[in-house]
Amino acid sequence: MAKPLFHDGLTVHTQSHDYPIVITEKTATENNSMAKQVAPYISGRQVLIVTNDTVAALYLNALTEELAEQFTVKVCVLPDGEQYKNQTSINQIYDALMAAHFNRDVTLIALGGGVVGDMTGFAAASFMRGVSFIQIPTTLLSQVDSSVGGKTGINHAQGKNMIGAFWQPQMVLADMSTLKTLPARELSAGLAEVIKYALIMDEAFLTWLENNLPAMMALDLAILGDAVKRCCQYKADIVAQDERESGVRALLNFGHTFGHVIETHQGYGNWLHGEAVAAGMVQAAELSQKMGWLTAEEVARVKRVLTLANLPITPPSIEVQTALDLMGHDKKVKHGQIRLILLKSLGKAVLTNDFDAKLLTDVLSPPRA
Amino acid sequence: MAKPLFHDGLTVHTQSHDYPIVITEKTATENNSMAKQVAPYISGRQVLIVTNDTVAALYLNALTEELAEQFTVKVCVLPDGEQYKNQTSINQIYDALMAAHFNRDVTLIALGGGVVGDMTGFAAASFMRGVSFIQIPTTLLSQVDSSVGGKTGINHAQGKNMIGAFWQPQMVLADMSTLKTLPARELSAGLAEVIKYALIMDEAFLTWLENNLPAMMALDLAILGDAVKRCCQYKADIVAQDERESGVRALLNFGHTFGHVIETHQGYGNWLHGEAVAAGMVQAAELSQKMGWLTAEEVARVKRVLTLANLPITPPSIEVQTALDLMGHDKKVKHGQIRLILLKSLGKAVLTNDFDAKLLTDVLSPPRA
């Protein structure tokens, strides 16, 4: 097993301001609570904690009580699940802010996974045209994915993440000890995004993951912290180059255009996002192979590392035309052309619309029974 | 009457990009249509025109038909009125965008007054985390007020403009000839904002208005165009210094904290925004007089110029405690203290929380019967 890297955090540089990601595995067990970590980044006296009913049962009381010693703290508990990532939930956050008579001084704290983080961030972006927010991501997926980049938003009935804003937090607290209470299936879903960074950015990290995934699956928090820090650093470097996704940032969507088809077709929440991305990355790798960029053995290696994380490598059966129609609704479509992120080699992704439509159709074709 | 100033437009500088305000009084009568003016600023092939049923009857067909020669044009017609400046209307815009399968390439065109402009701007800010938009303001108020500054948004049931974003248009077309179809009451409401610039920025412009208001009321489009250009330039100068309203930009809210009380108490839409601002400016001037900053004659001059524009100078009867509670909900509240914009002299405004609460109470007290 590799020696753990140093991982107490990093600084993210954005157009509006810089902010820290604090990575720790200590807060749940030592005199170093979530409240103590986030309090220095709260500028006013007003705090609204937004969470869901699942996470609330685990961490909300301790956080609320300790923050209430210094701040006026209100709470908004939303139902848990991607199917609630909608305007109704955003309106509940607005209503809580208005009922508390909070104003531009308020800091919103997102306590939960990516859904809570995305919704809280969008509410912060749009309440009084923008207030502060802090993220405490409690899932591996949100620690590696939504902690960096400022994407916030909700789903529209006809498409995922169709409504939102770019809005940066004041700080992110990634407390690895929250992963102890995360269902195994969600840990795996988070590992899909970790593996994604290896596939698009760094073949050496892929090797590191092949060696360390068993320890991560066994909840070695130090190793998980190393991986989170590496992923946040990869993403921070990319986002610093391209905050509004006009270029290189699009590479982070590797597997996501295929994955969105799976999620949308199956209904939000039935396949976890990370599971859909895992199967989508296999499809993208298969198309890369058909383009002559990956070997059959490399595609097999992609499947093996995903399997090591207990992730699906086969999409559900979806008619080709249905899949193509769903792709046409994806935000990555530019001037009517489907653009895909493919692999030139393991550890090197490219964004291209220069692929044979027949090859895409082959990859999308449901397996014959 | 003063000689008309040159007023074909100006350039607004913002953090994200610069954009032109084109001011013209020719489009409705010459070979210089709205469509020809805006087309060069549409970057993609997709256009959604958002308007309301009143304005649609006047200008929508011509604009749609001419743009359809170059673009895929869809239309979203909302009900007319401040009471529809809400989430339901925003959702109608999102639904129209999704139904058209439009993507990040789309340009939204706001054809109408401030309500249409604010909602279209917020939909543009939040659809796919931000797409382009163009404003064609068809009221004097929106020409002088919402053309510059990037404030977009909707009302919450408990407060005006509580939800929104800062988002800048690609261009603004202020076509003075649209004022010919504007109800006289709305022309007056727009003049309230014009007079506001004089009161907070430039006593010489106040004199100019005292001389030129009769011509403006008689729809002299050249004089109106001069005034629009001056107001846009004042506002552009302020916004360039302070895009997100952390300092000097707050002065533009002169009369608005008092005015919001009137609007909220009376229910949106019963008093026009400009009417409430007019009565609110009188209250702010009266408080300035009680502070010893304005003379009784100067307050009378404020009332006279507003009366020249056929605007109300007396607020409706509202209990003092109700008014104070409504003020507490205003976005201008900072750390629990009501901050007001008052006049140090005619043409010079200041933002202050250093006033005697008793004097504010006196100004807010309903007149005894």
Image (cartoon, coloured by chain):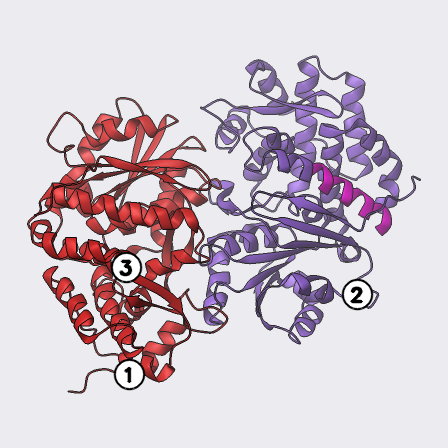
Chain colours: A purple, B red
Give the residue displayed 50% in from the left and 46% down from the top. A164
Q: Chain of mark 1?
A: B
Q: Is residue A218 visible?
A: no
Check disc 1 and report its element: helix, strand or loop.
Answer: helix
Disc 2 residue type (three-letter): Asn
Q: Are marks 3 and 2 on the same chain?
A: no
- The residue that disc 2 covers is A32
Residue B313 horizontal side relative to residue B264, left or right: left
Q: Are marks 3 and 1 on the same chain?
A: yes
Residue A325 horizontal side relative to residue B347, left or right: right
Is A222 covered by the magenta stretch?
yes
Indicate the position of residue A358 as horizontal and vertical percent values: 57, 14
Q: Which label sits in the foreground, 1 or 2?
A: 1
Disc 1 residue type (three-letter): Asp
- The residue that disc 1 covers is B362
Labelled disc at residue B83: 3
B319, above or below A126, in the image: below
Give the residue displayed 33% in from the left and 63% down from the top. B349
Tell me how far mark 1 sits from mark 2, CA to CA. Answer: 51 Å
Q: Residues within 10 Å of mark 1 (few under 14, many from 20)?
A: some
Residue A34 horizontal side relative to residue B115, left or right: right
Indicate the position of residue A58 as horizontal and vertical percent values: 72, 65
Which span is picked out in magenta? A221-235
Secondary structure mostly taken by the magenta-highlighted segment of the chain: helix
Give the residue displayed 23% in from the left and 65% down from the top. B276
